[in-house]
């Protein structure tokens, strides 16, 4: 059976999803299934039957999605950018669950996404910004 | 006061990347595209006795050396032509390409690869896979008669005489292991024919390297091949030469089949078969006089180069020239050898030999200090290079050396002095400081005689300046910094500057994106070109200005004797790492990282900060986490589950400070910054671990297994220093 990753990228044209490892380790292909982060490279397409799939293509158009992009962009959370879409999706799931995460909770939340460029610190700072702005705007 | 160019701006590519809208190679559509898979050798060393090529299904092709045009050459040209595109009779490493399978369906290709590889028969030979086996010519020489791709010497003063008259001679040996780049986007390209030209779309640091390799293999003039760099998901040196190795077979296939052909390595292939950082063995004999000053240093550095030369000769030179770190010793001899083995060729990786040399040199200094009963930093300060000092290649340090004030800063913010005293020796806690430098740009005569960089700026009809350069964005921020440099000269917003042409047919060769040279060398050329454009943006029509590299007149280099100014300028660094070592499991927990750098002047503080933090975390991976073992020519770790790179949970935040020291031949005073940020972490970590376990360490990575061996092993150099006092560490002042 085909991988969910291939169906989404090739049949649906959702190329914000990246393939970094194909073995469920790096998180570049992260999507949300029923609100939970899943690496789409290790999921057969049948496993998504009847479930809600969200990708960065939809998340980035929401109010919080725009703030996630803001948080990553303004403080240096993006370098080569290949891991970034997967990280943005993971941040969305993290903030839905916990709108006010501590630095440790952020580091824990994104620990399934590998980044070789940034050393993560500026990504963590970006999430703190996004969380604070999201809370501010929803008051 | 900081120059205003240093002020952080938002990177021009940040939003498009974080919205997932920037296409990488795998996101491109090509009509009638075929896919390719590499057929590889399954022995590390052998003679092919029978290929037994299986039958191909319809619409599939098998490309081998036989398909290279008669005017071409079976090689991947780098510095030498020794690395074949496809092995013909002999194979020198496990995974060496034998052929390329091309066809419409990837699953079918995967099955065919299995059939083709298992059909080949070999007469297997004994493989040499380590430095020691390579030097011992195990199985007979892999290369030449002595297995050495390079055997170089550089000499200053009278090292032999000084060693003879030394009151004390100290000897040490250090070893470092492989490191894999793990760029998150694997090696990827599509070869096709456009406007009659073989055209390569590729994830690369060096589009002109790809052009050179492809045109040589096909026997075409370079101008008849076009290379287009696609958004590149990380490089770190791994996309410096290796893209040539995947591009040449695809180009040969395109020349024959005339369809777009895509080759993207899957992660396991990428981990198993692409180049790594050179393993090293560095031996020192150090002579001290009656006053315990170091008067002679004899260095024997060996790098494990793998089966073909690739860039090993040049990596070796940078390693050799880093082997005295930032110290001035009056009498020095350095021998460097790049030894051939039956492994995939080692190649460029951020630091390019310097991390190996600096780790050895910095650990050496800590160990000499212990032997003579002196504080590490005191010994280092006694020998520190300063402005005007001769270098080990009899060149000169022309710039002001700000290491003393950088060191002072790092000691203060880290609380080093107090912690160093309070933690005692072998009690599970430690803190260490390294000092280091990294020469910006190519080594020796690279810039002035080999690269000869050329840039152009086009004044477009719409009044905007367009940068025509070969340097590419690989995550390091050059799309932003180059724009800022030109915009600052022209006094326009940086968003007005156009910089999006990455087709070798339309840009001049300003050299590769490597060697901490993009901003330092090419950025300077852009600054000078922009000056020619100043006041002319309102002129009608379109025109171009050009700037060609000129080596500063005060610099001299003799490539034969390796004598003179090895680099135009240096970036300098001080790193401090604090650790806790679990006294049962010997796992090392990094508690703090403090850094200070002189990169001349930061073109953008945000970009530099990204380099500093990213470099530090990658360096900590090299120092303690990333273990890549090789058995009989095969890498034992070949998934991302077992070759572990740092995650967000592994290391703490990194503190940093920048010390301005404008360099006259850098844009707004900037020097290189991409590699110095990696170089010094491992020895700072090493020094901290030594304090925590109370034993000398002599290798990387410092895994718990190795540390346990050091603590419990028989070869245990126990330090006799006593714990001085036991006060709790005081709160540490934070960085400015």
Image: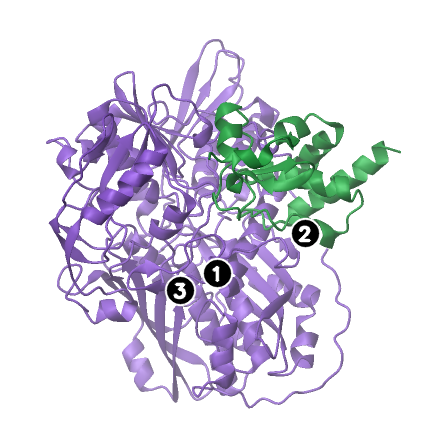
Chain colours: A green, B purple
- Disc 3 secondary structure class: loop
- Residue ranking furthest to the top: B540
Residue pointed to by mark 3: B177
Query: Which chain does the residue under circle 2 lie in?
Result: A
Query: How many other residues sit within 10 Å of disc 2, few (<14), some (14-19) or many (≥20)?
Result: many
Query: How many other residues sit within 10 Å of disc 1, few (<14), some (14-19) or many (≥20)?
Result: many
- Residue ranking furthest to the right: A139
Structural distance between the alpha carbons of marks 1 and 3: 9 Å
Q: Position of residue B406 (x, y in %)?
A: 61, 61
Labels 2 & 3 near each other (Cβ < 8 A): no
Whether residue B354 is situated above or below residue A3 in the rendered picture:
below
Closer to us: B461 or A114: A114
Q: Position of residue A131 (x, y in %)?
A: 77, 40
Residue pointed to by mark 2: A107
Same subunit: marks 2 and 1: no
- Disc 2 secondary structure class: helix
Query: How many other residues sit within 10 Å of disc 3, few (<14), some (14-19) or many (≥20)?
Result: many
Closer to us: B279 or B403: B279
Q: Position of residue B158 (x, y in %)?
A: 29, 75
Same subunit: marks 1 and 3: yes
Which residue is painted at 60% across and 65% down in the image?
B576
Query: Which chain does the residue under circle 1 lie in?
Result: B
Of the 4 image quadrants, the one containing the C terminus of chain A is: top right
Whether residue B71 is situated above or below residue A105 in the rendered picture:
above
Structural distance between the alpha carbons of marks 2 and 1: 20 Å
Structural distance between the alpha carbons of marks 2 and 3: 29 Å
Closer to us: A117 or B611: A117
- Disc 1 secondary structure class: loop
Residue pointed to by mark 1: B626
Q: Earlier in the sequence, mark 1 or mark 3?
A: 3
Query: Which chain does the residue under circle 3 lie in?
Result: B
């Amino acid at each position: 059976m085909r991988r969910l990753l291939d169906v989404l990228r090739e049949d649906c044209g959702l190329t914000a999803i990246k393939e970094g490892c194909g073995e469920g380790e790096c998180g570049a292909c992260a999507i949300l299934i029923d609100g939970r982060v899943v690496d789409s490279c290790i999921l057969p397409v049948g496993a998504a039957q009847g479930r809600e799939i969200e990708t960065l293509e939809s998340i980035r158009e929401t109010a919080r999605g725009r703030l996630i992009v803001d948080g990553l962009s303004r403080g240096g959370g993006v370098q080569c950018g290949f891991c970034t879409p997967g990280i943005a999706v993971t941040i969305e799931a993290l903030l839905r669950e916990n709108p006010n995460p501590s630095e440790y909770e952020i580091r824990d939340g994104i620990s399934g996404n590998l980044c070789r460029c940034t050393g993560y610190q500026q990504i963590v700072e970006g999430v703190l910004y996004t969380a604070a702005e999201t809370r501010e705007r929803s008051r | 006061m900081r120059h205003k160019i240093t002020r952080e701006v938002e990177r021009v590519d940040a939003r498009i990347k974080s919205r997932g809208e920037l296409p990488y190679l795998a996101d491109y559509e090509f009509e009638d595209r075929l896919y390719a898979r590499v057929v590889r050798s399954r022995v590390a060393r052998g003679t092919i006795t029978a290929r037994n090529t299986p039958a191909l299904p319809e619409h599939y092709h098998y490309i081998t050396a036989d398909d290279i045009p008669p005017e071409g050459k079976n090689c991947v040209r780098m510095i030498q032509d020794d690395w074949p595109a496809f092995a013909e009779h002999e194979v020198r490493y496990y995974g060496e390409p034998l052929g390329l399978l091309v066809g419409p369906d990837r699953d079918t290709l995967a099955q065919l690869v299995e059939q083709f590889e298992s059909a080949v028969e070999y007469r297997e030979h004994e493989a040499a896979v380590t430095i020691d086996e390579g030097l011992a010519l195990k199985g007979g020489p892999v290369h030449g008669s002595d297995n050495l791709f390079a055997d170089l010497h550089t000499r200053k003063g009278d090292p032999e005489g000084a060693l003879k008259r030394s009151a004390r001679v100290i000897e040490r040996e250090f070893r470092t292991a492989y490191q894999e780049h793990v760029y998150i986007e694997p090696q990827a390209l599509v070869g096709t024919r456009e406007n009659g030209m073989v055209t390569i779309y590729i994830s690369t640091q060096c589009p002109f390297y790809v052009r050179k390799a492809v045109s040589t293999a096909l026997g075409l003039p370079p101008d008849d091949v076009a290379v287009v760099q696609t958004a590149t998901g990380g490089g770190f040196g791994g996309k410096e030469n290796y893209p040539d190795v995947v591009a040449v077979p695809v180009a040969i296939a395109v020349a024959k089949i005339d369809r777009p052909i895509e080759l993207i390595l899957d992660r396991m292939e990428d981990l198993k078969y692409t180049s790594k950082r050179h393993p090293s063995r560095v031996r020192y004999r150090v002579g001290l006089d009656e006053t315990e000053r170091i008067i002679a240093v004899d260095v024997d550095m060996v790098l494990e180069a793998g089966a073909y030369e690739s860039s090993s000769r040049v990596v070796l030179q940078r390693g050799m020239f880093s082997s005295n770190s930032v110290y001035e010793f009056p009498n020095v001899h350095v021998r460097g050898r790049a030894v051939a083995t039956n492994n995939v060729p080692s190649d460029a990786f951020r630091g390019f030999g310097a991390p190996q040399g600096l780790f050895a040199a910095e650990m050496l200094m800590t160990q000499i200090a212990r032997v003579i009963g002196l504080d590490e930093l005191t010994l280092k300060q006694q020998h520190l290079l300063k402005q005007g000092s001769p270098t080990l290649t009899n060149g000169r340090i022309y710039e002001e050396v700000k290491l003393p004030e950088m060191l002072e800063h790092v000691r203060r913010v880290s609380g080093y002095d107090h912690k160093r005293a309070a933690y005692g020796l072998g009690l599970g806690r430690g803190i260490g400081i390294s000092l280091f430098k990294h020469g910006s740009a190519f080594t020796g005569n690279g810039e002035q005689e080999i690269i000869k960089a050329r840039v152009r700026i086009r004044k477009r009809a719409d009044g905007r300046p367009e940068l025509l350069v070969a340097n590419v964005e690989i995550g390091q921020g050059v799309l932003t910094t180059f724009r800022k440099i030109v915009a600052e000269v022209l006094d326009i917003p940086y968003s007005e500057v156009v910089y999006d042409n990455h087709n070798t047919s339309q840009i001049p060769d300003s050299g590769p994106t490597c060697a901490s040279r993009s901003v330092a060398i090419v950025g300077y050329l852009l600054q000078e070109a922009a000056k020619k454009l100043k006041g002319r943006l309102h002129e009608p029509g379109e025109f171009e200005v050009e700037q060609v590299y000129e080596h500063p007149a005060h610099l001299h280099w003799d490539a034969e004797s390796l004598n003179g100014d090895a680099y135009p300028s240096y970036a300098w660094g001080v790193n401090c790492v604090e650790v806790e070592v679990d006294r049962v499991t010997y796992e090392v927990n990094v508690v703090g990282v403090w850094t200070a750098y002189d990169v001349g002047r930061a073109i953008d503080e945000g970009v530099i900060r990204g380099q500093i933090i990213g470099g530090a975390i990658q360096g900590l991976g090299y120092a303690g986490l990333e273990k890549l073992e090789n058995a009989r020519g095969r890498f034992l770790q070949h998934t991302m589950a077992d070759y572990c790179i740092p995650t967000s949970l592994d290391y703490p935040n990194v503190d940093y400070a920048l010390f301005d020291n404008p360099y006259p031949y850098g844009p707004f005073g900037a020097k290189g910054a991409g590699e110095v940020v990696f170089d010094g972490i491992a020895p700072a970590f090493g020094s901290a671990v030594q304090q925590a376990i109370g034993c000398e360490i002599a290798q990387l990575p410092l895994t718990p297994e190795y540390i346990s061996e050091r603590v419990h092993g028989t070869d245990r150099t126990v330090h006799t220093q006593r714990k001085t006092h036991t006060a709790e560490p005081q709160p540490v002042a934070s960085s400015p």
